[in-house]
Image (tube, rainbow, N blue to C red):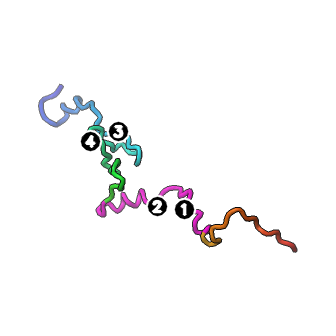
Amino acid sequence: MGKKGKGTGSFGKRRNKTHTICRRCNAKSYHIQKATCSGCGYPSPKKRTYQWGQKAIRRSTTGSGRMRYMKDLPRRFKNGFQEGTEAKKLTA
């Protein structure tokens, strides 16, 4: 290969993967030897967040996804979380 050092000649020798896919954040940030994710902090129960990374927090906070459960809550709350009822028929 090339000469000794960290430059161009050394890049051909780099063939070991340090990070793989994380099962929680789905990013290629899970360090195999350390067994921790550098993105979300998995397997720690608390998600890894810092105040200096406001944009990163914004990307993965509530409302950035589909919100399959939470988008119905205001309407259900307004009706008192009623279930199993049917609308009354309008008689004109």
Which residue in the protein does label 4 denote?
34
Tell me the CA gap for discs 3 and 2. Answer: 26 Å
Quarter of the rendering occupied by the C terminus: bottom right
Please, which residue is most extreme toward the right here? 92
Q: Secondary structure at mark 3?
A: strand
Please, which residue is most extreme toward the bottom here? 92
Q: Nearer the viewer, mark 2 or mark 1?
A: 1
In the rendered image, residue 84, in percent from the top left (x then y), is placed at 71, 62
Give me the disc on residue 70: 1
Which residue in the protein does label 3 denote?
20
Q: Is residue 34 left or right of residue 54?
A: left
Neighbour class for label 4 at 10 Å: few (<14), some, many (≥20)? few
Q: Nearer the viewer, mark 3 or mark 1?
A: 1
Tell me the CA gap for discs 2 and 1. Answer: 9 Å
Amino acid type of the residue tagged 3 in the rendering? Thr
N-term mark: 2 or 1: 2
- Residue at 43 percent across and 60 percent down: it is 61
Q: Which residues are magenta?
A: 50-76
Amino acid type of the residue tagged 2 in the rendering? Thr
In the rendered image, residue 44, in percent from the top left (x then y), is placed at 33, 51
Which residue in the protein does label 2 denote?
62
